[in-house]
Image (cartoon, rainbow, N blue to C red):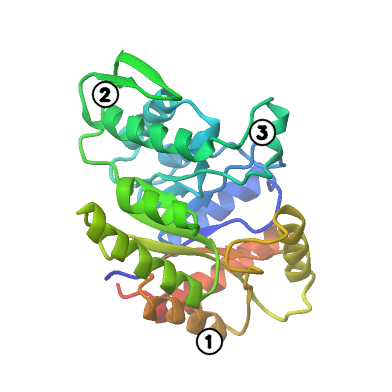
Amino acid sequence: MSIRIGVGSGLGQPMPVEDYWRWVTLCEARGVDSIWHSDQLLRPSLEPMVMLSALAAATKTLRFGMNALVISHRDPLVVAKECATIDYLAPGRFIPVFGVGDASDPAWSATGRSPKARGGRANEALTLVRRLLTEDSVSFEGEHFQYADAMVAPRPARLLPIWIGGASEAAIQRTALLGDGWLGGFTSPQVAGQVVARIKAALKETGRLIDPDHYGVVVPFRIGGADDPAVGRFARAIRARRPEPEGGAPPIVVGTTADVADAFRRFVEVGVSKFVAVPLAENAQDLLAQTERLADEILPTVEDR
């Protein structure tokens, strides 16, 4: 099991573009595994598939993914074409992660749609994305999508892994049925361990396998004190967005570099080996400083390179 730590921005809004590329350069130079962009259609954020295309062109070794793309909001043919294009630009460095989205997401009402059938819509979309990325021609008659001789070209030369987000029972079953990996959201080691165990049990029912390397979580952290303004801002933002997140209130790892490293190790003990570490920062300069300390002081003690 290979332990790797990537990063996502914890600023809550896009940083100035010159600072963004300084951050990317720092991550690649310091050996950070990957960079992740979340999918927030109606919030101040950057569109993840566009950003991953930019990362593919601007980097050489960094991997990257979306955390997680809400497949229920998108057309699977367009998503499959985007995935194939990004993998073409950066072969082997793209990790697509898909989620269903919250019923409370304002994007549903903003676009005049109901979230009630989002699970079934997501299952059909994921099935289509996988088929479009591996088959010459795809015809499909489902409840939500009807395709006739659809195709994506060029297709990835490798089998593009599809990771699933979420910790609900539906997400667990979806991962066991359709996924090649799992990326949990803000959760504790105890809950993450339970989800990993339940996915493995569900895999026995579906007769599928998931590589032990393909279990991950998102970890918000701050090298500093619990009273640092960035910690309070993040906690308030999460409570406002998701009053009752899966697994309870999101745990925030705060303390010394040794404390943060120990938190990662507790996840590793329950079967998690991939991380999206989210540095909680006040501004771009603070984000750079937190990321630099993560790379220099924590990665060498946690990863097994």
Q: CA distance from mark 1 to mark 3?
A: 42 Å
Mark earlier in primary sequence (2, 1): 2
Q: Is residue 267 left or right of residue 291?
A: left
The answer to whether residue 282 of the structure is visible from this angle is no
Classify residue 213 by image quadrant.
Answer: bottom left
Q: What amino acid is found at the position of numbered circle 1 in the picture?
A: Ala
Q: CA distance from mark 2 to mark 1?
A: 46 Å
User: How many callouts does the rendering have?
Assistant: 3
Mark earlier in primary sequence (1, 3): 3
Q: Which residue is mark 2?
A: 154
Q: Which residue is mark 3?
A: 108
Q: What amino acid is found at the position of numbered circle 3 in the picture?
A: Trp
- Which residue appears at 63% of the width and 68% of the height? 250
x and y percentages locating residue 179 in the rendered image: 33, 49
x and y percentages locating residue 111 in the rendered image: 68, 26
Q: What amino acid is found at the position of numbered circle 2 in the picture?
A: Pro
x and y percentages locating residue 225 in the rendered image: 72, 81
- Which residue appears at 70% of the width and 53% of the height? 12
Q: Which mark is residue 258?
A: 1
Quarter of the image for the C terminus: give it: bottom left
- Which residue appears at 65% of the width and 42% of the height? 17
The answer to whether residue 170 of the structure is visible from this angle is yes
Q: Residue furthest top?
A: 148
Q: Secondary structure beneath disc 1?
A: helix
Q: Nearer the viewer, mark 1 or mark 3?
A: 3
Q: CA distance from mark 2 to mark 3?
A: 32 Å
Mark earlier in primary sequence (2, 3): 3
x and y percentages locating residue 180 in the rendered image: 30, 51
| Structural crowding at the residue carrying mark 1, measured as other residues with C-alpha within 10 Å and reported as few (<14), some (14–19) or many (≥20) | few
Q: Secondary structure beneath disc 3?
A: helix
